[in-house]
Amino acid sequence: MTRKLKGIFLIIVIVGIFLFWYFNRKDYPNPTAEYYVNDFANALSPATKHNIVEKGEILYDYYKDVEGNGGAQIVVATFLLEEAADMNQYDPTDIFNQWKIGKNDMGLLIVLYFINQEYEGYQLPEFYAIDTAIGYQMKQYLTASRVGAIVDATILTEEDFDMGIAKMLHEFLWIVTEKAYGYEEFQPFNEEGYQEYFDYYIPDDSEDIVNTTIWSYIFSSSMTLFEKIIMIGAVVFVVGGSGLFIINRGGGGASGGAGIFRRRR
């Protein structure tokens, strides 16, 4: 391929990528590669994020092939607010449907809102409120009243925020596995075991998901410096703007809302 044809090809690729991004852009960010935890507020501890992802993957993988209602997914997202009124920018139902949570409409989205508070000269995110959206079929098992009761008894009353999330997630998993899938051997919450887990958890760098294929091609010897610069610019623009290369593991579910909203007392 001549240099001129390569240049034309690159222009076509860039225009195609831009058009794909433009017509598929969304109002909310795409889910992260981990999917089950989307800590946009950067407010969750590594141990809590790992626990959410691990439990989410186990739930989905173990029951995804159950006929009729398999594929339950519980997804957590966090958002940082400048002020309380900024919550109006987020609609959990729209986020749920954009992310397609839960196969067979067996999804639950938990949205946690944070507001920065100053502690000893530092701005740190403080939990402010929780909102949810429930999949159409999931509502048979996790009704709004059940979700509200669990939220009230866990994350809204537990002094330790990490422990509150762990207790809340445990209760949701208990109900889903028992009511939807007939599993009757779910064990009670082990607070001592979770405390030890939070105290001694060490992140594993191998858990990070990085897509290197396109970068390997860009930095190969098959492209000139000028071509590399053009492609890097296009990739940074598209990835930064749309999350195009993020791994999305949504089950295809939808929600009509019917969740609950609570502020931290």
Image (cartoon, rainbow, N blue to C red):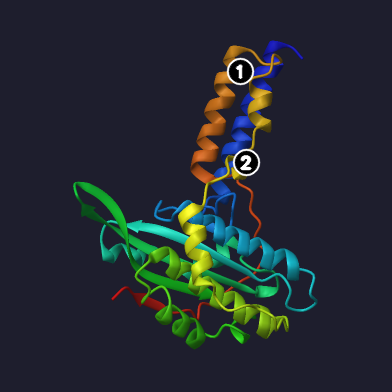
Q: Nearer the viewer, mark 2 or mark 1?
A: 2
Q: Mark 2 points at which residue?
A: 206
Q: Quadrant of residue 57?
A: bottom right
Amino acid identity at mark 2: Ser
At label 1, the amino acid type is Glu
Q: Can you give x and y, in whole percent of width and height, for residue 113 in the image?
A: 37, 63
Check disc 1: other Cα within 10 Å, few if <14, some if 14-19, many if 20+.
Answer: some
Give whichever of 136, 126 is nearer the camera: 126
Image location (x, y in percent) of residue 221: 69, 14
Position of residue 125 in the picture relative to residue 208 (left or right): left
Taking the spot 54% from the left edge, 39% from the top edge, the residue there is 239
Between residue 90 and residue 116, name the one nearer to us.
116
Residue that mark 1 sits on: 227
Q: What's the residue at 51%, 52% (across, down)?
A: 201
Tell me what residue is drawn at x 44 percent, y 67 percent. Answer: 163
Q: Which of 220 and 54 is in front in this view?
A: 54
Picture disc at residue 239: none
Cα–Cα gap, marks 2 and 1: 32 Å
